Image: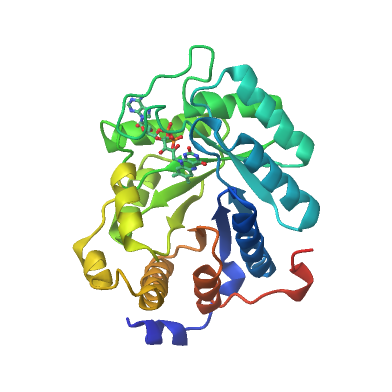
Amino acid sequence: MTLVEQHKRPPARAALEVSFEFFPPKSAEMEGGLWAAIERLAPLDPNFVSVTYGAGGSTRERTHATVARLVKETHLRPAAHLTCVSATRDEVDDVVRGYGRAGVRHIVALRGDPAGGPGTAFAAHEGGYQSSADLVRGIKRLGDFEVSVSAYPEKHPESASFEADLDGLKAKIDAGATRAITQFFFDNEHYLRFMDRVRGAGITIPVVPGIVPVENFKQTASFAKRTGASVPQWLADRYEGLDNDPATRKLVAGTVASEQVFGLLDHGVREFHFYTMNKSELVFAICHLLGMRPKPAQAAA
Ligand code: FAD
């Protein structure tokens, strides 16, 4: 089905849920960009918006400040990411309590990349949470938080097998997680096959596909290598010759990501998590194609 044919279908907006992921800004200028993106996307009334946590807690204060401001100044429901790398339990618990005090009710709990970076061996902090499941349990002990976790349609790069990954996901659910968000992927087949395994393993929680509109192909391809997400040749071909042509890259990015989302929609997927890169244009346009329209009363304060 072509994009034009797809767009002719009646929008399924009533049943759709979206969430948006942001990262905490490093400078005043980036902060301006982030809040402009939030203001643009907020009226789409996302299920939640999440804010990432830098490796090893490097953005601890900035993540906190961003989610606290989201609670104070918008109607949005923020989810704060949290990792347990290179930190004691007490330090991590302090962050969780701080989120709670700021009015955050949802945490995306992650183990985090090894301190030496992706690809190096992971060693849990002696006095810290030992795994993501351990972290989920700790968070649930500290308060009535909703907890989301990660899932990897192409397997986590450190994982020995899909079965080990599914065991890990089950352990996180047993510890209290009620939603998984996937690493980004470009071939929908990876997600669909993964979901067969997930459901086959008796896992029933929502496993929401993470979608990244690729404006900067080179950067995304290099990031994908570290995360274990494969970059198909057809995708590279679509960006061929566009290194110095950001305007065309943006159009291509919107088309590719829309195709991906409509492809998933055709398979019954109704929930999407967008990695926004703190930009609103493409994500807003894709949501628009999906039939979502801004709700004036829901505009950011
Ligand atoms: P886990 O669920 O802990 O592990 C995934 C799988 O890897 C396990 O099921 C298991 O099979 C295998 N595995 C894990 N540990 C081992 C081990 N020691 N030996 C063998 N196999 C093992 N990172 C950040 O720093 N900040 C963020 O805000 C952030 N947000 C993310 C959001 C999403 C939706 C996703 C998908 C990832 C995010 N990450 C983030 C990246 C994540 O921290 C890394 O992928 C990290 O390497 C794994 O943490 P995890 O909780 O995802 O994995």
Q: Is residue 117 above or below residue 20?
A: above
Q: Give the residue at x 33% y 83%.
A: 2
Any part of residue 163 in sight: yes
Q: Is residue 223 above or below residue 211?
A: above
Any part of residue 143 in sight: no
Whole-percent x and y of residue 82? 57, 35
Whole-percent x and y of residue 6? 41, 82
Q: Is residue 81 above or below residue 94?
A: below
Q: Give the residue at x 58% y 47%.
A: 26
In the rendered structure, the answer to whether residue 245 lies left or right of residue 62 reads left
Outermost residue, top direction? 126
In the rendered structure, the answer to whether residue 86 lies left or right of residue 154 reads right
Q: Give the residue at x 43% y 49%.
A: 182
Whole-percent x and y of residue 124? 44, 19
Depth order, front residue of 285/179: 285
Q: Quadrant of residue 202?
A: top left
| Ligand 1 quarter of the rendering | top left
Whole-percent x and y of residue 196? 34, 50
Depth order, front residue of 13/98: 98
Q: Quadrant of the N terminus?
A: bottom left
Q: Quadrant of the C terminus?
A: bottom right
Q: Quadrant of residue 260?
A: bottom left
Structure colour scheme: rainbow
In the rendered structure, the answer to whether residue 154 lies left or right of residue 19 reads left
Total count of labels: 0
Q: Give the residue at x 75% y 68%.
A: 298
In the rendered structure, the answer to whether residue 206 lies left or right of residue 6 reads right
